Amino acid sequence: MHNRVRLYLSACFYYSGLVSLMRWWTQRSSPGLVILYYHQASIQDLRRHWLYLRRHYRILPLEQALEELSCSPAQVGPKQDRRTLLAVTFDDGYEDNYSQAFPLACELEVPITIFLIAGYLESGSAFWWATRWLRLAQVEQVSWQGCTYRLDQQEERKALAQVIDACFRQATSSDEREHLLTTLSQLLAVPSSLVPKEEPAPLLTWAQVHEMQASGWVSFGAHTIHHPDLGMLKDPVEVAHEVGACRPLLEQQLDHPVRLFAYPFGSIGDSGPHAVKESGYTWAVTTRPGVNTSQSDPHLLRRRKMDGKHWLVVATETAGIWSFFSSLKNGVRLLMRRPIYSPERPGQIKRQII
């Protein structure tokens, strides 16, 4: 229901001309950079998104866009194209980034940046989300954290998958994640021989990475070694390893410096930004929505999620309409709570709350 309402409102904003007005206002106010991010790619959705975006935005590779954003107007020089800067990114490096997004990027001449999980590329492993493990289960029911789930019931299977995925995300070390994986395999009685047959690795290979890089339309950044939630890791040394050790692995394969980093799950943690700086990355992106300016923290850049969205919603979000209304609502709330002077009792302050 929420998504449907959002789509209807987006259509109203677009066809009323409000989206065009917001784009015009943004172009003539302070220069900014909109960064979008996807995970897995649907060529139908991407085509609709990118056909719209390339008409109304100046799409550049992420590094080039960030370099231009950090320059003064005098350094950039006079611009013939006043459209707002935009960059397209993908997280995790799923195989469909190669089979779906890459051909379309070449066809439409839309540069993209993919953030790679170096450890998975090196080992040929894949994401083993709980939903995939449960399809391989050889038991009818499972007890997990004091609850029993029947695997022949779709709702119970879905609930168990969410609980298990949360456990993996909240693991505080690599050893804990490995222990969870072993426990899950034993609990579900999944024969090891079934795993590679049932679930081919959905992530990119180095050969595909090299082919995309050679095209000139795809660049790459780092996304840790094993995709942990940095905010959940207790040991700063492990955070530093996950953030820093993936960089030389990627640089060895790509044969050039890797300057970009993306936080897994958008989770920063207490030591994440420090680890990113110490590892030598020039920029790092989060999943916090918003527009970036020359004053933005280069290691806490904002992005907007575009997975599975209608192109009208994409048009509305990239124009910043939802952010505008959110800021307006917050401003009204502050005004309603502002202390006011009481003329009946001089010197006394009343707090107006509506």
Image (tube, rainbow, N blue to C red):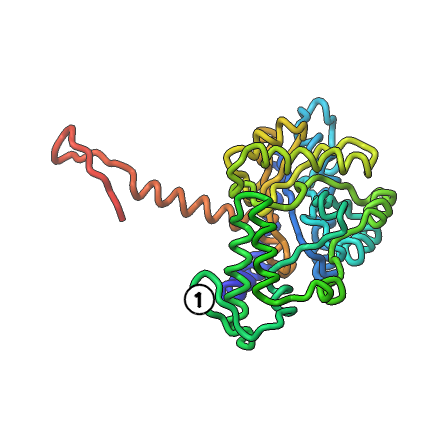
Q: Looking at this view, is 142 or 52 the one in front? A: 142
**158 is higher (above) or lower (below) than 253:** below
- Which residue is depicted at the point 65% across and 47% down? 36
Type of amino acid at the residue the image marks with label 1: Cys
- Which residue is depicted at the point 45% across and 44% down? 327
Residue most toward the top? 74
User: Based on the displayed image, in which of its 4 quarters is residue 48 positioned?
Assistant: bottom right
Instruction: Give the percent coordinates (x, y) of residue 210.
Output: 85, 44
Instruction: Give the percent coordinates (x, y) of residue 156.
Output: 50, 71
Apparent side of residue 143 relative to residue 26 in the rendered image (left or right): left
- Which residue is depicted at the point 23% across and 39% down? 351
Label 1, residues with CA under 10 Å away: few <14, some 14-19, many ≥20: few
**19 is higher (above) or lower (below) than 213:** below
Apparent side of residue 55 relative to residue 155 in the rendered image (left or right): right
User: Based on the displayed image, in which of its 4 quarters is residue 80 positioned?
Assistant: top right
Instruction: Give the percent coordinates (x, y) of residue 111.
Output: 77, 45
Q: Looking at this view, is 353 or 263 the one in front? A: 263
Question: In this view of the protein, can residue 22 be seen by the observer?
Answer: no
Question: In this view of the protein, can residue 203 be seen by the observer?
Answer: yes
Helix, strand or loop at label 1? It is strand
Instruction: Give the percent coordinates (x, y) of residue 59.
Output: 73, 43
On the image, numbered disc 1 is attached to which residue? Answer: 147
Residue most toward the bottom? 152
Apparent side of residue 91 relative to residue 139 in the rendered image (left or right): right
